Amino acid sequence: MQVNGKNYETIWMKDQMVRMIEQNLLPYEFKIFTARNYKETCFAIKSMIVRGAGAIGAAAGFAMAQAAMEADARNYMTYLKIARKDIESTRPTARNLFAATEKVYNAALEGKDAALNAAHEIAEKDKMDSLNIGKLGNGLIKDGYRIETHCNAGWLAFVDHGTALSPIYMARDSGKKIFVYVDETRPRGQGAKLTAWELLNEEIPHAIIPDNAGAHLMSKGLIDMVIVGADRIALNGDVANKIGTLEKAIAAKYYNIPFYVAAPISTFDFNCLTGKEIIIEERVEEEVLYQKGIDANGHMTEILVAAPNAKAINPAFDVTPAGLITGIITEKAIIKATNQEIMGLKD
Ligand code: MRU
């Protein structure tokens, strides 16, 4: 996608270096972070320099390939195993990360070039999948639709195009007038900061709404559909996504508003029977108690937004039961959130 008139992807690898947009600085500063080895790529995933299921999948694949390149012949296997463990312990919820380490690790057993090729294939496929999700999802959007989205499942959450936002970009490109309600997505503000930044760049009409405003807008008939992304989808159609998704789905069901999940097949966990098995990342309480932004002088700053010494809990994801989901937009087809239709996606 375009940033200041130049085409960018969220993450890419060249000459063993993994480069990515520094998402912790957005929307205030646009900077590229370079990870010179697999440990630095792990750091980038853990510290959320790169975030979003598809983007961390690509990052994990690149990290695994970096490890293969770094390893010397005498301890190749030991190095690969340790690296895989390190990469897989960065963040637990997004399925794409584990799918990527598995694929590149297996390729690395054949050699360094195979590992590198596998990592690039993951990133390329992520882009194509996002585009196809956009094409299929666009078919669901009618001219004049007002769409609510949660968190950031735009191009910054993938290598390019995104999932929940990809149909929105395509709808705009095909001449439909649309309006996007962007949940701010406390505590890290991926909606207010990242989705709003993407939509501003693309000149798509939108408004950031407080996280607790969605049901109210739905009750007033102001929302025609909801599209969200996913971090992991269980075999029965339960969907783990950014915390707060479940509340939107419950409200949408109550008001009879279509609630769609957009996700590539790499987000489906065919070994996970129901959402109960999905590990939900718990993040530090400081993310809830403090907020980051810029001050009047444009300097990045952090302030306490809670009672001093108050405690907080910070689950990063929730699980939306399949029964609340109208459909899942994948790169192959729009399916129902059922075991049977999900099994049909398997190669
Ligand atoms: O914690 P994040 O920002 O990595 O969250 C993941 C997500 O991007 C969202 O849950 C998103 O809605 C899923 S689509 C990548």
Image: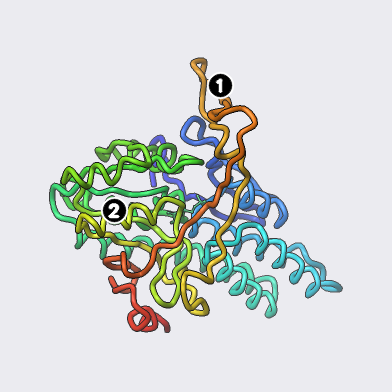
Determine crowd level at label 1: few under 14, some 14-19, many 20+ residues with C-alpha closer than 10 A.
Answer: few
**In terms of sequence position, does the residue under pointer 1 or pointer 2 come before the other?**
2
Indicate the secondary structure of the residue bearing disc 1. loop
Residue 44 point in image, percent of width and height? 63, 49
Which of pointers 1 and 2 indicates the residue nearer the eye? Answer: 2
Determine crowd level at label 2: few under 14, some 14-19, many 20+ residues with C-alpha closer than 10 A.
Answer: some
Q: Amino acid at mark 1?
A: His
Q: Amino acid at mark 2?
A: Ala
Q: Is residue 299 above or below residue 69?
A: above
Residue visible at 55% across and 60% down in the picture: 280
Residue 200 disc label: none
On the rendered structure, is 37 left or right of 320?
Answer: right
Residue 25 point in image, percent of width and height? 54, 35
- Mark 2 and mark 1 in contact (Cβ < 8 Å)? no
Indicate the secondary structure of the residue bearing disc 2. helix
Residue visible at 59% across and 53% down in the picture: 282
Circle 1 is placed at which residue position?
299
Residue visible at 65% across and 57% down in the picture: 90
The quarter of the displayed image where residue 260 is located: bottom left
Decide which of 79, 304 is in the foreground and name it: 304
Badge count:
2
On the rendered structure, is 108 left or right of 125?
Answer: right
Q: Residue reaching furthest left?
A: 143
Q: CA distance from mark 1 to mark 2?
A: 38 Å
Residue 251 disc label: 2
Q: Is residue 347 above or below residue 67?
A: below
Residue 11 point in image, percent of width and height? 53, 52
Colour scheme employed for the rendering of this structure:
rainbow
Residue 219 point in image, percent of width and height? 20, 46
The quarter of the displayed image where residue 335 is located: bottom left
